[in-house]
Image: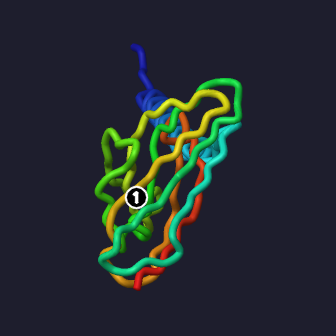
Amino acid sequence: MQTINNRDSGNKTLLWIAGGCLVVLACIIGAIVLGFGGLYWLGSQSPENVTVQVEIPSQAQVGDPFEFDITVTNSGPESVQLFSTAISMNFLNGIIIDRTNPQFTETNQYDALGGGETFINYYFSQSIAPGETLKVVFSGKAVSTGVFSGNMDVCINSDFNCITNVARTVIK
């Protein structure tokens, strides 16, 4: 007569299940760490051989036309593309933008990672040849009184390769 010890095979099964769960858990933690690390790396990228100059009026009156310029200069040996400009709603709460020159192709709104700031993205997809400069004029109207400030990201070749400036205007 043969005796089977079910207790030993049950313990082995539990060890295999526990080991499998640990492997799955380690993979999930690794994916989270690598995902946030990748997002941090993407956010820390900045364009090479490109300079950005932002000219914003320091003051305006409610009801008056409001205009600001972003000038992008390509000092590199290859063409670059002004992909988009992301402007904080903290700045735009006092201003309505009704047109740009050159005309934007589309817009969208998003919240920054970690919250706290909402942005409107204006997409341009404008090519800038080596040694050339592109000036984008944002036109609109001052609509609310107060001090309005926020980040303004000018993104080159993608949504992740950006130069950040701070915009600030007092509207009376």
* Residue drawn at point x = 35 percent, y = 42 percent: 103
* Nearer to the camera, 69 or 113: 69
Horizontal side of 122 relative to 48 (left or right) equals: left
Q: Looking at the rendering, in which quadrant would you find the N terminus?
A: top left
* Residue drawn at point x = 62 percent, y = 49 percent: 52
Percent across and percent down for residue 112 are 44, 57
> Relative to 108, does residue 21 appear above or below in the rendering?
above
SS type, badge 1: strand
* Nearer to the camera, 163 or 76: 76
> Relative to 16, does residue 166 appear above or below in the rendering?
below
* Nearer to the camera, 25 or 40: 40
* Residue drawn at point x = 43 percent, y = 69 percent: 91
Residue furthest to the top in view is 1
Residue 47 falls in which quadrant of the image? top right
Percent across and percent down for residue 104 are 35, 43
Residue holding disc 1: 119
Residue 165 falls in which quadrant of the image? bottom right
Percent across and percent down for residue 125 are 43, 34
> Relative to 55, does residue 61 appear above or below in the rendering?
below
Residue 77 visible to an observer of this rendering = yes
> Relative to 125, does residue 87 appear above or below in the rendering?
below
Percent across and percent down for residue 69 are 50, 55
**The disc labelled 1 sits on which kind of residue?**
Phe
* Residue drawn at point x = 51 percent, y = 58 percent: 152
* Nearer to the camera, 127 or 21: 127
Q: Looking at the rendering, in which quadrant would you find the C terminus?
A: bottom left
